[in-house]
């Protein structure tokens, strides 16, 4: 079992004014299981994260850098000059006491937020807007970063963490740098009890079931699945086909699709 111990993190309790309760249905609809393998888990408080960062032209100072139980990246508590406090996604290398700002043409420094048209080509960005004024929707998980490859016309070309290259309006905001906690994928959970505390219930293999319970069930010992195509527990064929909607409007913004996993 392993955990992440980062020198970025500062001790202390979270900001009370930015905490809220989150009612968890844990995969139930009207008391019946609608999504399997969800339930229990530790009680957690939701942090109000400012993905929009619309407090323009106001300098803020990083007060603390904390863990968020609902996300893989670290979060930073920002104290603004006007007295307001907000949580934002912390970038890698951010330090307590650092000053940041959101501007149309912000200084090219880690943690600042600026319009894509004012960010130099070759810069790594995160918390990227897809629609103006809607707030960051992509590139928010631990260690991720998108690369600005070109700015032409009213669009910027951005290479996403998946390898996909797509057009994004140059009037959208993006934060400079890479998302914090890049070692998140190296964590070894180590034991089943820790997974239960995360709110995940046990999963039974289909091959261990009886034929009446699953398409893969039955047989003596470890038998092959006995069906030509992979199927779900309800017999629906799965795998081997594209799941993206062909009529999706944003398809025309994709310049090149992500490559296949090796």
Image (cartoon, rainbow, N blue to C red):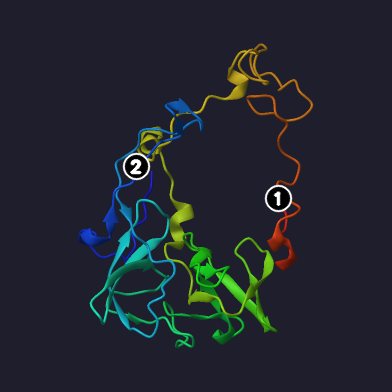
At x 39%, y 73%, the residue is 93
Q: Is residue 206 above or below residue 76?
A: above
Residue 108, can we see it? yes
Q: Is residue 15 visible?
A: no
Left or right: 197 in relation to 214: left
Mark identifier at residue 244:
1
Q: Which of the two discs, 2 and 1, sits closer to the camera?
A: 2
Give coordinates of residue 95: x percent, y percent.
Answer: 32, 75
Whole-percent x, y for residue 54 in the image: 41, 75
The quarter in which the N terminus is drawn is top left
Q: Which residue is mark 2?
A: 23
Q: Dot 1: what SS?
A: loop
- Asked which secondary structure carries label 2, the reply is loop
In the rendered image, the vertical position of residue 147 relative to residue 189, given as above or below = below
- Sequence order check, earlier mark of 2 and 1: 2
Q: Nearer the viewer, residue 163 or 170?
A: 170
Front one among 4 and 138: 138
Which of these two is toward me, 197 or 223? 197
In this view, the residue farthest toward the right is 228
Residue located 53% across and 74% down the image: 125
List x then y, in percent, for residue 240: 75, 41
In the figure, 246 relative to 161: above or below? above
């Amino acid at each position: 079992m392993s955990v992440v111990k980062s020198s970025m993190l500062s001790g202390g309790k979270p900001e009370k004014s930015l905490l809220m309760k989150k009612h968890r249905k844990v995969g139930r609809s009207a008391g019946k299981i609608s999504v399997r393998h969800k339930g229990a888990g530790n009680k957690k408080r939701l942090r109000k994260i400012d993905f929009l960062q619309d407090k323009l032209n106001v300098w803020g100072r990083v007060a603390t850098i904390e863990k968020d139980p609902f996300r893989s990246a670290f979060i930073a508590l920002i104290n603004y000059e006007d007295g307001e406090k907000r949580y934002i996604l912390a970038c890698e290398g951010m330090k307590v006491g650092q000053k940041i700002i959101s501007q149309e043409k912000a200084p090219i420094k880690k943690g600042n937020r600026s319009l894509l048209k004012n960010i130099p080509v070759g810069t790594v960005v995160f918390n990227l807007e897809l629609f103006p004024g809607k707030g960051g929707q992509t590139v928010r998980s631990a260690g991720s970063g998108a690369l600005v490859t070109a700015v032409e016309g009213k669009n910027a070309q951005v290479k996403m963490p998946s390898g996909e290259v797509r057009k994004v309006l140059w009037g959208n905001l993006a934060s400079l740098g890479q998302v914090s906690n890049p070692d998140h994928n190296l964590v070894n959970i180590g034991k089943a009890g820790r997974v239960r505390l995360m709110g995940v219930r046990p999963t039974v293999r289909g091959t261990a079931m009886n034929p009446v319970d699953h398409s893969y069930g039955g047989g003596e010992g470890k038998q092959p699945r006995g069906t030509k195509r992979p199927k779900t527990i309800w017999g629906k064929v799965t795998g081997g086909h594209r799941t993206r909607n062909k009529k999706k409007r944003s398809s025309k913004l994709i310049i090149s699709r992500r490559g296949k996993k090796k």
